Image (spheres, rainbow, N blue to C red):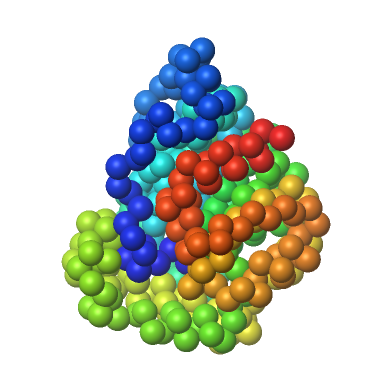
Amino acid sequence: MNILGIFPFRGGALKPLAGLIPAAIRHLNTCPPPPPPIERTLKIGQHKVNFVEAGAGEKGVILLPGALGTAWTDFKPQIEQLPVLLPNHKIIAWDPPGYGKSRPPEKEFGLDFYERDAEAAAGLMEKMGFEGGFSVAGWSDGGITGMILAGRKPSQVEKLVIWGSNAYIAPKEAEIYENIRDVSKWSARMREPMEKVYGVDGFPKVWSAWVDGMLGIYKHRNGNICKELLDKILAPTFILHGAKDPMIVPEHVPHLQSSIANTSLHVFPEGKHNIHLKYAEEFNKLVSDFIQK
């Protein structure tokens, strides 16, 4: 879950490009820079979907944000850096239907909202010309969407990258969701990023609806989000994990490793939920190396 306000804001200024790893520096010195990101919308099913397109490669990678997250709130360092590290790939970062600029309509958090997002993500990549295959990188809720997409359409997902994600809801996690429902208890710094997207009055309503959606899955599906799809994932899968992530219980990582056929793991010992922003340069290098293998 992207608890955007509960962790340090992740859309701030990037570190200088000089901090990138030497291979990226050499690439910058020998290749023209990728074109600047552009923001577009496409009709996917009944939804207008907003997304950011970066890079000019022939292969595709879709970035799937967390709960209530958008392309820019959740993936600014990746939008800026991955086109350099993955020159043969086009980066697509979306606002899922019902989030950010992919509104109206507002999101409905029924028991199948992850499945609907997975279908829409596949539809977007197909419309972008990647129906033959693409890579998926998903954070938190986006990682759940990615696992469902990879399990339902195994021939389309070439590589899968997930972090901060779970295939089921543990009892402790249900308690966490209820405890963070009331955003008035959050600090102003924690609330502001989402208030900018949804409005001061709108954010509490959307967040509470998300909590209700998660608790609905916990109560009516015995906490199962997508466990039955894990053994259907054929794509090589890279699990990244913050060892101090307060949003998922530690048991999820070994469960994913034992349930998905082809996995590798990298742990950030001091990482929390937002490792891709806290450790952006290291994270981006690890992910780009994996996708290019």
Q: Which quarter of the rendering shows the C terminus?
A: top right
* Residue at point 53%, 20% (across, down): 27
* Residue at point 70%, 41% (across, down): 158
Using residue 285 as the reference point, say whether residue 104 is left or right of it.
Answer: left
Residue 98, located in which quarter of the rendered image? bottom left
Position above or below: 61 against 238? above
* Residue at point 32%, 57% (across, down): 9
Image coordinates of residue 49 in percent, x first then y, are 41, 46
Image coordinates of residue 65 in percent, x first then y, are 46, 54
Q: Nearer the viewer, residue 253 or 96?
A: 253
Position above or below: 108 against 29? below
Q: Nearer the viewer, residue 45 or 30?
A: 30
Q: Can residue 25 be seen from the camera position used here?
A: yes
Q: How many marks?
A: 0
Image coordinates of residue 130 in percent, x first then y, are 61, 34
* Residue at point 59%, 82% (across, down): 170
Using residue 140 as the reference point, say whether residue 154 is left or right of it.
Answer: right
Image coordinates of residue 88 in percent, x first then y, are 59, 25
